[in-house]
Each structure stands twice: as C-alpha cells, then as structure tokens.
Image (cartoon, rainbow, N blue to C red):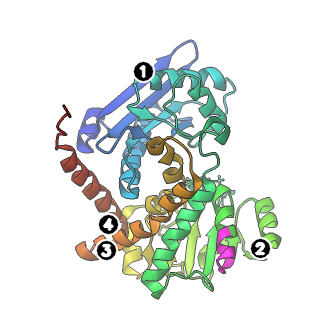
Amino acid sequence: MDSILAYMERYDYEHLFICQDKTLNFKAVIAIHDTTLGPATGGCRMWQYGDEMEAIEDALRLARGMTYKYAAAGVNLGGGKAVILGDPHRKDREPVFRLLGKFIDRLGGLYITGEDVGTTLKDMEYIRMETPHVVTLPSYLGGAGDIAPMTAFGVIRAMQACCNKVFGSNTIDGKVVAVQGLGAVGHNIVGQLHELGATLIVTDIDSQKVNNIVPKYNVKAVAPEEIYDVDCDIFCPCALGGIINDETLDRLKCRIICGSANNQLKEERHGDLLEAKGMVYAPDYIANAGGTIFDTDRLETGSVNNERGKERVSRIYENMEKVFEIAERDNIPTYIAADRMAEERIQQVEKVKRFVVTPKT
Ligand code: NAD
C-alpha cells in the first residue's frame, strides 16, 4: 500500500483512527469501512506486525471483510476492525485493553469490538470496563459465550445447501466429509455431522485432538498432508487459510468445499479454477458467519436468546441458495457472487434509508 488515502478512496472507507500511548507502549488502529447498515463491528486482533503500514493495511482489509460478512448474512451492522500492534502474549492485559476500551468509547458507538486472533474473552471483559461497545462477552456478562458451536452449525447449513445443489437433496446422511482441523469449530462440526449420519475422515497437526475425537465418534484419521487426497464428497477446511492453492487443487477429489476457515482461496483465481473443475465452493464468509450472527443478535434485540439466534444462523442455508442464484444469473463463480450479494444489499438498504419518516405530532 503506497498511500493510505488512495487505498481508502479505492475501497470507499469512512474512517481510520490511530491510537497511541507512550507510557503503556500502546499502539492501535481502528478502521471503519462502511456504516450504511449499522455501526461498524468487528473483532480486535493483536499481532506483531512487521511495521505500522502492515498493521494499517490489515485493519483496513479486515474491516472491509466485515462489511461484506454482515451484509451478506442479513445482519444490520457495518464493517470495522481494531488491531493492537505488539506481542499477542504480552502480560499487561488489563491496562492495554482498558485503554483500547477508552478509545472505542470516545467513538460513541460508531465502532463495536469483539474477540479475534490474539485476544480472548477475558480481554473483552477489560474493554467492557470502559465501554459498552463490545459484543463478544462471556454469558455471565450478558454475552453469547462460546460461539464456535453456532459457527459449526452455520457451516453445516451451508453444506446442506451445497448438497442440495450438487446431489439434489440436502441430506448429509451417508456423505463422506473430510474435516481439516479439530479445534473450536472443527470438533463441533465433527460432532454435529456425526449426529446427521455423515462418514468422517479427520486430521489435525495436534495428535492429542485427533486421539480425543477418533474413539468418541469412531471416525477415521489421516496424516495432515493426506487430507487433500482422500476420496470424499465434501472437503471441510477448519484450520488455516490459503489451503486451496496450486499445490492442493488437483489433489482434491470432492464435489463440495465448505468449511469455517477464513480466506480458503490462496488467490482469487483458485476460485475460478474450482468452478472450472465443477466443484461447488461455499464462500468462506458466507459459511462461517454463524458465530457472528449468533453473537451480534443481542445488539438488535437486547438479549441472548438461543432459539432465535439459532433460527437466524439457520438462514445461512437460504444465503447460500441466493449465492447460487446470483452465480447463475450473472454467470460468475460463487466467491464473486457472494460479494455481489453483499453489495446489492447495501445498495438496496441505502435506497430505503433515503426515505424520511414524518415526525408524529
Ligand atoms: P482453533 O485454533 O481452535 O482450531 C484450529 C485447528 O486447526 C487447531 O486444532 C490446529 O491444531 C489445527 N491446524 C492448524 N494447522 C493445521 C494443518 N496444517 N492441518 C491440520 N490441522 C491444522 O480455531 P477455530 O476457532 O476452530 O477456527 C478454525 C478456522 O475457522 C480459522 O480459520 C478461523 O479463523 C475460522 N473461524 C472461526 C470462527 C469461530 O467461531 N471460532 C468463526 C469464523 C471463522
């Protein structure tokens, strides 16, 4: 990125806030992309960046990603993101996160933060001491608590829509699913897919996680590198980004790729190549929105309600169907159709917002 303002102009950003405090060695960036649908919302990442431009670029890129994620999910929130520059393992968490809370509070609700890479629910509690504008909170503080089971449920709803598209029925029973990564989301996916009658092949670089899952659900495990080669109907990446790449693409034998991992396509052209091979790709931010849909539901309604939250997450099925419709309508791959769906919703809501409500006398 050569010029911050040129980058912001190109992708239509609203704000960029840079925060620092010398005594606490605190440096953070808050990026606000688009607030057409509602306050800019997105987690706070803590990371040791190479330099400050890298941090700014990451905050801007992630904030824009959140705009698309919420818009496509039908949630009335805009896109924002905070990043704290520095060692994610630094010990002085309370002053660091309370200070970030102060900066967020100054924005008066323009930006709502949450947990992300390098931050924890405990850090969110510190932020909550200084501002109400934080969404990811433990249940004892009125938050949704652990959202991974809902992320997993949302991925499975997307998977069912993909099955309907490919096999003409949304049933998971009897499908062979290869799950890469058995962490917070992956292990929940395995449990839920097992209930639905899938045959599972799993892997993780952490052998302890594999050893826990295999006997529990009587599933087959393979070495991490072998997961791309297994015969399966669905490949479900729940570990890292960039796993659909030049090296793996020709090895995959599945009909569907649907998982929770962010940024699954190493480059956009890999989405085109999947399409050309006749594989159905569930765009990551459509499939993995369940946790965030569940988590932010209380912002609109004032309280956590599992039944209502689950119902909203369940609509990821319809969101996937809409992605397929747009892909067919415009003859484009699904990863582009997802962006188009988000952009169309923002444009439509912008039009609705033009109408002024006459004040009641
Ligand atoms: P996690 O850290 O709990 O689990 C990731 C797992 O992947 C770990 O068990 C790790 O050992 C394993 N792993 C790492 N590299 C691997 C490799 N090369 N092969 C096999 N396994 C490997 O993370 P998570 O919360 O379960 O999230 C998984 C993915 O989903 C991430 O990309 C995350 O960004 C994304 N995601 C998570 C959520 C959520 O609710 N937690 C929501 C949206 C997106």
Q: In the current view of this chain or complex, which residue is farthest to the front?
A: 361
In the rendered image, which quarter contains the C terminus?
Answer: top left
Residue at the spot 77% in from the left edge and 73% down from the top edge: 217
CB-based contact (under 8 Å), mark 3 and mark 1: no
Give the residue at mark 2.
217
Callout in the foreground (4, 3) = 3
**Was residue 199 drawn as part of the magenta stretch in this picture?**
yes
Q: Position of residue 268 (x, y in %)?
A: 37, 63
* Number of residues whose C-alpha sits closer than 10 Å to that of mark 1, classed few (under 14), some (14–19) or many (20 or more): few
Residue at the spot 45% in from the left edge and 69% down from the top edge: 317
Question: Where on the image, by quarter, is ligand 1?
Answer: bottom right
* Number of residues whose C-alpha sits closer than 10 Å to that of mark 4, classed few (under 14), some (14–19) or many (20 or more): many
Give the residue at mark 1.
106
Amino acid type of the residue that numbered disc 1 sits on in the rendered structure: Arg
> Which is more N-terminal, label 3 or label 2?
2
In space, the residues marked 2 and 4 are separated at their CA atoms by: 36 Å
Disc assigned to residue 325: 3
**Magenta region: which residues?**
192-200
Amino acid type of the residue that numbered disc 4 sits on in the rendered structure: Ala
CB-based contact (under 8 Å), mark 2 and mark 4: no
Disc assigned to residue 337: 4
> Which is more N-terminal, label 3 or label 4?
3
Amino acid type of the residue that numbered disc 3 sits on in the rendered structure: Glu
* Number of residues whose C-alpha sits closer than 10 Å to that of mark 3, classed few (under 14), some (14–19) or many (20 or more): some
Disc assigned to residue 230: none
Q: Position of residue 226 (x, y in %)?
A: 66, 74
CB-based contact (under 8 Å), mark 4 and mark 3: no
Q: Is residue 24 left or right of residue 31?
A: right
Q: Position of residue 180 (x, y in %)?
A: 63, 67
In space, the residues marked 3 and 1 are separated at their CA atoms by: 42 Å
Question: What element does badge 1 sit on?
Answer: helix
